[in-house]
Amino acid sequence: MLKSLERTGRIAYLSGTMTPQAALELQVLRYRAMSREERVAIALRLHEFACEMTRLGIRRQHPGASVEQVEELLRQRLELARTL
């Protein structure tokens, strides 16, 4: 089933007919086909990517900040996100 959906999804994507709902369904099926370790690895990479994007934003807002200051501001933002 996953193979036929991947083919269908690929064809839909290439033809420009992929809907957001179809893309989400395909993504969920692909995640379900992965091992727990693969899903955790993806989550960790996404977290690190989000942290790096946040660091870039902090550096843009505080151009004179040291590496330590940037990391402290990042920790503060992560803590704030946990409380929301």
Image (spheres, helix red, strand yellow):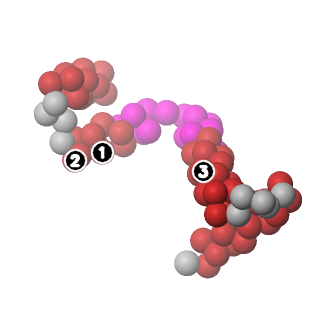
The magenta stretch is: 29-44
Residue closest to the far bottom: 83
Q: Residue at x 60, y 50 (%)?
A: 53
On residue 21, the disc is 2
Q: Amino acid at mark 1?
A: Leu
Q: Check contact, mark 2 vs mark 1: CB within 8 A.
A: yes
Whether the magenta-drawn stretch holds residue 52 is answered as: no
Residue under the image location 64 percent in, 75 percent down: 80
Picture quadrant of residue 55: bottom right
In this view, the residue in front, 22 or 48, is 48
Number of callouts in the render? 3
- Residue 3, image x, y percentages: 30, 21
- Looking at the rendered image, the quarter that the N terminus falls into is top left
Dot 2 lies on which element? helix
Pointer 2 or 3: first along the chain: 2
Task: Kindly identify the amino acid type of the residue bearing the numbered disc 2.
Answer: Gln
Q: Hey, what amino acid is under mark 3?
A: Met
Callout 1 secondary element? helix
Q: 10 Å neighbourhood of mark 2: few (<14), some, or many (≥20)?
A: few
Q: Position of residue 27 (x, y in %)?
A: 36, 39
SS majority, magenta: helix
Whole-angstrom CA distance, mark 2 to mark 3, is: 27 Å
Which numbered circle lies on residue 24? 1
Question: If the image is split into quadrants, where does the C terminus sit?
Answer: bottom right
Q: Nearest the camera: 53 or 17?
A: 53
